[in-house]
Image (cartoon, helix red, strand yellow):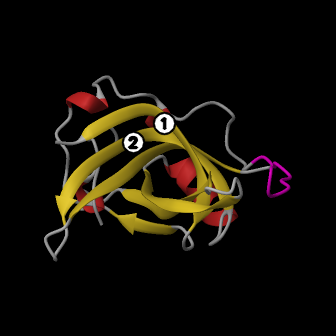
Protein backbone atom coordinates (compact mmCIF):
# COMPACT_ATOMS: atom_id res chain seq x y z
CA UNK A 1 0.00 0.00 0.00
CA UNK A 2 1.32 3.43 -0.93
CA UNK A 3 1.59 6.14 1.68
CA UNK A 4 1.30 9.80 0.63
CA UNK A 5 2.69 12.74 2.59
CA UNK A 6 1.70 16.21 1.41
CA UNK A 7 3.91 19.27 1.99
CA UNK A 8 7.03 17.10 2.13
CA UNK A 9 10.38 18.90 2.08
CA UNK A 10 13.77 17.35 1.38
CA UNK A 11 17.26 18.64 0.60
CA UNK A 12 19.73 16.63 -1.45
CA UNK A 13 21.94 16.45 -4.52
CA UNK A 14 20.90 15.67 -8.09
CA UNK A 15 22.35 12.32 -9.18
CA UNK A 16 22.13 13.28 -12.88
CA UNK A 17 21.00 16.20 -15.02
CA UNK A 18 17.20 16.68 -15.08
CA UNK A 19 15.39 15.24 -18.09
CA UNK A 20 12.15 16.05 -19.85
CA UNK A 21 9.93 13.12 -20.76
CA UNK A 22 6.59 12.80 -22.51
CA UNK A 23 3.85 10.94 -20.66
CA UNK A 24 1.55 8.48 -22.43
CA UNK A 25 -1.11 11.19 -22.43
CA UNK A 26 1.29 13.47 -24.35
CA UNK A 27 2.07 15.81 -21.46
CA UNK A 28 5.62 16.95 -20.72
CA UNK A 29 7.16 16.14 -17.33
CA UNK A 30 10.56 17.05 -15.93
CA UNK A 31 12.17 14.30 -13.84
CA UNK A 32 15.33 13.90 -11.80
CA UNK A 33 16.70 11.73 -9.01
CA UNK A 34 17.77 13.17 -5.68
CA UNK A 35 20.19 11.71 -3.11
CA UNK A 36 19.80 12.81 0.50
CA UNK A 37 22.95 12.09 2.50
CA UNK A 38 22.66 11.73 6.26
CA UNK A 39 25.29 12.25 8.95
CA UNK A 40 25.36 10.23 12.17
CA UNK A 41 27.58 10.06 15.23
CA UNK A 42 29.62 6.92 15.71
CA UNK A 43 30.36 5.28 19.07
CA UNK A 44 33.34 7.63 19.54
CA UNK A 45 31.16 10.73 19.08
CA UNK A 46 32.55 11.52 15.62
CA UNK A 47 30.33 12.44 12.70
CA UNK A 48 30.31 9.88 9.86
CA UNK A 49 28.33 9.30 6.70
CA UNK A 50 25.07 7.46 7.28
CA UNK A 51 22.70 5.82 4.81
CA UNK A 52 21.69 7.68 1.66
CA UNK A 53 18.01 8.12 0.82
CA UNK A 54 17.07 8.31 -2.86
CA UNK A 55 13.99 10.03 -4.29
CA UNK A 56 12.58 10.24 -7.81
CA UNK A 57 11.16 13.71 -8.45
CA UNK A 58 8.57 14.50 -11.13
CA UNK A 59 7.45 18.00 -12.09
CA UNK A 60 4.37 18.46 -14.24
CA UNK A 61 4.19 22.27 -14.01
CA UNK A 62 5.64 23.44 -17.33
CA UNK A 63 7.17 26.67 -16.03
CA UNK A 64 8.84 25.04 -13.03
CA UNK A 65 10.03 22.15 -15.20
CA UNK A 66 11.64 24.47 -17.75
CA UNK A 67 13.34 26.47 -15.00
CA UNK A 68 14.71 23.26 -13.46
CA UNK A 69 15.98 22.06 -16.87
CA UNK A 70 17.77 25.34 -17.59
CA UNK A 71 19.13 25.96 -14.08
CA UNK A 72 20.10 22.70 -12.38
CA UNK A 73 22.73 20.04 -13.10
CA UNK A 74 24.15 16.82 -11.68
CA UNK A 75 25.59 17.37 -8.20
CA UNK A 76 23.65 20.56 -7.47
CA UNK A 77 22.27 20.76 -3.94
CA UNK A 78 18.54 21.57 -4.01
CA UNK A 79 15.50 21.81 -1.79
CA UNK A 80 12.32 20.12 -3.06
CA UNK A 81 8.78 20.61 -1.79
CA UNK A 82 5.91 18.44 -2.92
CA UNK A 83 3.89 15.31 -2.24
CA UNK A 84 5.91 12.24 -1.25
CA UNK A 85 4.62 8.79 -2.10
CA UNK A 86 6.36 5.81 -0.54
CA UNK A 87 5.42 2.33 -1.73
CA UNK A 88 6.93 -1.09 -1.10
CA UNK A 89 8.17 -3.39 -3.87
CA UNK A 90 10.07 -6.64 -4.20
CA UNK A 91 13.46 -6.59 -5.92
CA UNK A 92 14.37 -9.16 -8.57
CA UNK A 93 16.35 -11.10 -5.96
CA UNK A 94 13.28 -11.33 -3.69
CA UNK A 95 14.40 -8.70 -1.17
CA UNK A 96 11.89 -6.02 -0.17
CA UNK A 97 12.51 -2.41 -1.13
CA UNK A 98 10.80 0.97 -0.89
CA UNK A 99 10.19 3.45 -3.72
CA UNK A 100 10.17 7.14 -2.74
CA UNK A 101 8.60 9.45 -5.33
CA UNK A 102 7.93 13.17 -5.06
CA UNK A 103 5.53 15.20 -7.20
CA UNK A 104 7.45 18.48 -6.97
CA UNK A 105 5.58 21.73 -6.35
CA UNK A 106 8.74 23.82 -5.91
CA UNK A 107 12.49 23.33 -6.35
CA UNK A 108 15.22 25.73 -5.31
CA UNK A 109 19.02 25.70 -5.12
CA UNK A 110 20.42 25.42 -1.60
CA UNK A 111 21.96 28.76 -0.75
CA UNK A 112 23.98 27.05 1.95
CA UNK A 113 26.10 25.48 -0.81
CA UNK A 114 25.50 27.78 -3.82
CA UNK A 115 24.98 31.40 -4.70
CA UNK A 116 22.05 32.46 -6.84
CA UNK A 117 21.10 35.49 -8.87
CA UNK A 118 17.32 35.24 -9.32
CA UNK A 119 16.16 36.61 -12.64
CA UNK A 120 12.67 36.87 -14.11
CA UNK A 121 12.01 34.11 -16.63
CA UNK A 122 9.95 36.36 -18.90
CA UNK A 123 6.60 35.02 -17.73
CA UNK A 124 3.94 36.63 -15.58
CA UNK A 125 4.56 36.48 -11.84
CA UNK A 126 1.02 35.21 -11.48
CA UNK A 127 0.62 31.47 -10.94
CA UNK A 128 -0.43 29.52 -13.99
CA UNK A 129 -3.63 27.50 -13.80
CA UNK A 130 -1.64 24.27 -13.96
CA UNK A 131 0.10 25.13 -10.70
CA UNK A 132 -3.17 25.43 -8.76
CA UNK A 133 -3.79 22.59 -6.30
CA UNK A 134 -6.00 19.78 -7.56
CA UNK A 135 -9.45 19.56 -6.00
CA UNK A 136 -9.07 15.89 -5.14
CA UNK A 137 -6.76 14.62 -2.43
CA UNK A 138 -3.58 12.87 -3.57
CA UNK A 139 -4.10 10.41 -0.73
CA UNK A 140 -7.41 9.28 -2.25
CA UNK A 141 -5.93 8.62 -5.71
CA UNK A 142 -4.83 5.16 -6.78
CA UNK A 143 -1.08 4.78 -7.40
CA UNK A 144 0.06 4.55 -11.00
CA UNK A 145 2.84 2.34 -12.30
CA UNK A 146 5.05 4.62 -14.43
CA UNK A 147 6.09 8.24 -14.83
CA UNK A 148 4.51 8.05 -18.26
CA UNK A 149 1.01 7.52 -16.81
CA UNK A 150 1.42 9.77 -13.78
CA UNK A 151 -0.80 12.79 -13.34
CA UNK A 152 -0.52 15.48 -10.66
CA UNK A 153 -2.15 14.16 -7.53
CA UNK A 154 -2.25 10.59 -8.88
CA UNK A 155 -0.16 9.33 -5.99
CA UNK A 156 3.07 8.39 -7.72
CA UNK A 157 4.91 6.56 -10.42
CA UNK A 158 7.96 4.46 -11.22
CA UNK A 159 10.39 4.79 -14.08
In the rendered image, residue 48, in percent from the top left (x then y), is placed at 65, 62
Query: With 99 as the anchor, is 114 left or right in this view?
Result: right
| Left or right of residue 48, residue 142 in this image | left
114 relative to 102, above or below: below
Q: Nearer the viewer, residue 15 or 122?
A: 15
Callout 1 secondary element: strand
Q: Could you tell me which residue is drawn at 16 percent across and 39 percent down?
A: 142
Q: Are marks 1 and 2 in contact (CB under 8 Å)?
A: yes
Q: Nearer the viewer, residue 30 or 87?
A: 87
Q: Which residue, as the protein is rendered here, is positioned at the far front?
A: 44
Residue 62, above or below 30: above
Magenta segment boundaries in residue numbering: 112-120
- Label 2: which secondary element: strand
**Position of 86 compared to 103: left or right?**
left
The residue that mark 2 highlights is 84
Q: Going 56% across and 45% down the picture, which residue do you hit?
A: 10
- When the figure is inspected, residue 84 is found, relative to residue 62, above or below; the finding is above
Q: Residues within 10 Å of mark 1 (few under 14, many from 20)?
A: some
In which quarter of the view is residue 43 placed? Answer: bottom right
Q: Which residue is mark 1?
A: 8
| Vertical arrangement, residue 151 with respect to residue 148, above or below | above
**Residue 128 drawn at (x, y percent):** 53, 35
Is 136 inside the magenta-drawn segment?
no
Amino acid sequence: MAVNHRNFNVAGNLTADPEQITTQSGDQMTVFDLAQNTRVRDAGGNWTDGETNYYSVGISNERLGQNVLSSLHKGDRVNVEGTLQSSPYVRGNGEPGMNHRIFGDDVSPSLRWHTASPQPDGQSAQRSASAAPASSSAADAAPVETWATAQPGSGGMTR
